[in-house]
Image: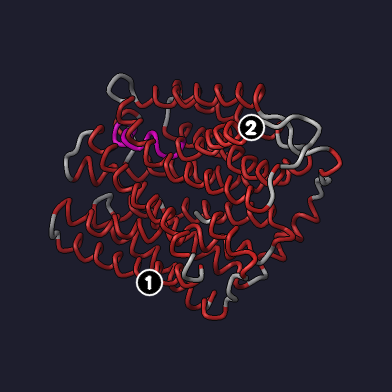
Amino acid sequence: MSTTGTAAPSKVRLALILGALIALGPLTIDTYLPALPDVGRDLAASGTTVQLTLTGTLAGLALGQILIGPLSDALGRRVPLLLGAGLHVVASALVWVTPSIEMLGVLRVLQGVGASAGAVVGLAVVRDLFTGRAAATMLSRLILVMGAAPVLAPTLGGALLTWTSWRGVFLVLAVYGLVMLAVVTTGLPETLPPSRRRPLRFGATLRTYGHLLRDRTFVGLVLVAGLAMGALFSYVSGAAYVYQQQFGLDQQTFGLLFGAGAIWLVVGTQLNPVLLRRFEPRQVMTVAVSAGVVFGALLAVLTALGVGGLPGVLAGVWPLLLCAGFVLPNAPALALARHGETAGTASALLGCLQFGIGAATSPIVGLLGNDALAMGLSMFGAITLSAIALFVVVRPWTLPDVNDAADEDFEAATA
């Protein structure tokens, strides 16, 4: 661990702090999912319009990463993190008095921008303090948190709705943000000394982004990851309506079933390093995308024919989520491996485009009808486009093998 003139917290304490910060994004996205039908009834909005508030959050997360990444390199880690957490708290608290679906959409965008600070700065802090095996180990722990938070968030939301309204869910998020402000203020030292900070130069940043966007393979891998995330967010945006309105589940049962589905995503991410001991990441990614298309087609057929009811939907959704769990770590890792000299900027662009594609995909379920068929078609379409990007743009057979010296770190980082 490197030193920056200020005593760094222990590894366990640091992992807890950074994990809690990174979890702010998934909690902001998913905790209110069981309440989506309630939001529509209370604000006299259609299901499609309510789903646009989820799109707003994803757009905010995308925009925030582009803005906060360069700021944290220029100003240090703590200032952007405190500003982001403060913005999240204010936006969350204002939801309590929002009078319209339009204002809720604006506040959700601001929530997303604020929450993005935790993800961007959290990963930057790891880069500041650790190298080699230690960095890879810490990243694997944080990625596990990123996978577990979406599992727990809808269940937490369902529990909260037993004693408060959907507006109360956002007050709980505001309190969580306040706790994070206190934790950062008292427990997370500045990890980027002034000597290592880079001036904030708009032109240089744009040139770096332009260089990345001219790399066909990088862009293709971003599309593979982004469209796989699009399939995931088609599920996220449609599940509440499919499970509660079409199949009649209550909010608490929905939270449990949604969490059960998200577990398959976590299983994929945690089995990934096991497979990487024997196979190249491009091989795992290629098989996962191809299998995802097969299961997406199964889901579309079962929902179109109305075969199997809710178990039939789950038979297609759960294995597709498992496949996404293998794609989401490997595609970004392969993309970033091509640009180690600009890893921070590349990470920001990758995160922005991933969440941007997710934001564009999530309303499609509502436009198609907010039922199981709409969700199935959207998930199938997204993973099919991911496969097209992989085989037409990336052409995985042209990717080099991960060199032996990097194997161990790569496996841990994609755990």
Residue at 60% x, 58% y is: 409
312 lies left or right of 286: left
Residue 16 belongs to the span the image colors magenta: no
Q: Quadrant of the N terminus?
A: top right
Q: Tell me which numbered mark, 1 or 2, is placed earlier along the sequence.
A: 2
Q: How many angstroms separate mark 1 from mark 2 (CA)?
A: 42 Å
Q: What residue sits 21% from the left and 41% below the top?
A: 245
**Residues in magenta?**
28-39
Horizontally, is 63 left or right of 160 in the view? right
In the displayed image of the protein, which residue is found farthest to the right?
195
Quadrant in which residue 341 is drawn: bottom right
- Secondary structure found at label 1: helix
**Could you say which quadrant of the image residue 48 lies in?**
top left
x, y percent for residue 24: 51, 35
| Farthest-out residue, bottom | 398
Q: How many marks?
A: 2
The location of residue 352, given as percent across then percent down, is 58, 52
Q: Is residue 176 visible?
A: yes
Residue under label 2: 10
Question: Is residue 398 placed above or below 9 in the rendered structure?
Answer: below
Residue type pointed to by label 2: Ser
Q: Name the spot of residue 210 as percent of width and height, x first.
A: 71, 63
Q: Which residue is mark 1?
A: 290
Tell me the amino acid under the disc marked 1. Ser
Mark 2: give few (<14), some (14-19) or many (20+) Cα within 10 Å: few
